[in-house]
């Protein structure tokens, strides 16, 4: 479990706090989406939890590790992996094996190989193992970066706008990976500006003016989608459709929030009405 308590943050060269008394927790196995307008402090939270930025005010507790008290940031980085928007900025090598094994150097060779293969498998890139990284698409490179994080065996994964730069086909592949990782038991924080990523989350936190202004649970997504509008966050198209249907007395209960689920659910309703 991750517990963020009364966290505030101010950058050295600015006067105002970018985060002000933030409180939230992330349960094991959950996917949390953090949304908010540009500059609302999403990445700052991600970097604090990942132990990249130094916590100054409040506390962040990751399982039994208290970031404020723990001077050993390596322990935190072992538990929490982070992936950023642009894979080009995270890739150092041209060879995929070199890239994935770089931070595993003190492990035994067979263990490194196992981890690299498993991680590549998890992101559907095992068959690309011998390819040069520069030949891959941006989406494929992002999957390699996710694999690199997975190879370090983290429990928590923070994705900071993981698909913002990726084409729509590549986005879908990454969404599938995120869903699979949840099934495998990873706990995921997805920082996002993209409406569709909200559909993956168990809970969505809306960040506004340095505060968590609202929290929407997955089960309330249809009823509370209007709140996203209030904070200037684009609604997933699927949610708009579901809301309109509900307003027209066609209430559908979706679990996966996919188009095929929507179609099947509608089909079910039509067949039911015909037989009544
Ligand atoms: N290194 C820094 N020094 C000073 N100010 C910073 C620094 N990094 C971020 N900021 C400021 O802090 C605020 C929050 O930034 P942050 O990157 O956390 O927001 P964000 O919600 O991730 O934005 P975006 O949607 O653009 O990624 C912004 O006003 C930003 O300009
Ligand atoms: Mg950001």
Image (spheres, rainbow, N blue to C red):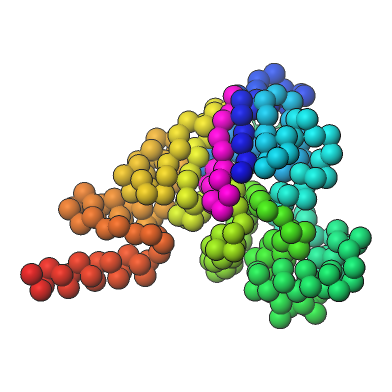
Task: Judge whether residue 142 can be spotted in this image.
Answer: yes
Residue 109 picture quarter = bottom right
- Residue occupying the far left of the picture: 276
x and y percentages locating residue 95 in the rendered image: 84, 71
Q: Nearer the viewer, residue 231 or 143?
A: 143
Q: How many marks?
A: 0
Indicate whether 130 appears above or below 187. below
User: In percent of the image, x 78 and y 50: which residue is there?
Assistant: 78
Indicate whether 109 appears above or below 10. below
Q: Main secondary structure of the magenta part?
A: strand
x and y percentages locating residue 134 in the rendered image: 78, 70
User: In percent of the image, x 69 and y 18: which residue is there?
Assistant: 15
The C terminus sits in image quarter: bottom left
Q: Nearer the viewer, residue 219 or 13?
A: 219
Residue 67 picture quarter = top right
x and y percentages locating residue 264 in the rendered image: 30, 70
Indicate whether 90 appears above or below 126. above
Residue 32 belongs to magenta span: yes
x and y percentages locating residue 93 in the rendered image: 86, 65
Magenta highlight range: 21-34
User: In percent of the image, x 38 and y 55: which residue is there?
Assistant: 237
Q: Is residue 75 left or right of residue 84?
A: right
């Amino acid at each position: 479990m991750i517990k963020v308590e009364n966290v505030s943050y101010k950058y050295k060269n600015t006067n105002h706090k970018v985060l002000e008394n933030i409180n939230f927790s992330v349960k094991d196995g959950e996917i949390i989406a953090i949304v908010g307008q540009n500059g609302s402090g999403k990445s700052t939270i991600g970097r604090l939890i990942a132990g990249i930025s130094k916590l100054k005010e409040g506390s962040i507790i990751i399982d039994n590790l208290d970031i404020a008290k723990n001077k050993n940031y390596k322990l935190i980085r072992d538990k929490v992996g982070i992936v950023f928007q642009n894979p080009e900025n995270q890739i150092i090598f041209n060879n995929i094996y070199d890239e994935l094994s770089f931070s595993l150097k003190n492990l035994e060779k067979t263990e490194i190989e196992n981890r690299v293969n498993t991680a590549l498998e998890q992101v559907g890139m095992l068959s690309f193992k011998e390819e040069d990284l520069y030949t891959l698409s941006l989406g494929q490179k992002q999957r390699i970066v996710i694999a690199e994080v997975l190879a370090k065996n983290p429990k928590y994964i923070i994705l900071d706008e993981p698909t913002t730069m990726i084409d729509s086909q590549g986005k879908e592949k990454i969404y599938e990976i995120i869903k699979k990782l949840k099934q495998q038991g990873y706990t995921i924080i997805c920082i996002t500006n993209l409406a569709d990523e909200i559909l993956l989350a168990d809970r969505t936190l809306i960040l506004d003016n340095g505060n968590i202004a609202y929290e929407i649970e997955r089960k309330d997504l249809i009823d509370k989608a209007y709140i996203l509008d209030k904070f200037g966050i684009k609604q997933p198209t699927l949610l708009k459709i579901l809301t309109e249907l509900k307003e027209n007395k066609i209430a559908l209960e979706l679990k996966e929030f996919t188009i095929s689920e929507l179609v099947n659910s509608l089909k079910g309703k039509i067949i039911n009405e015909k037989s009544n």
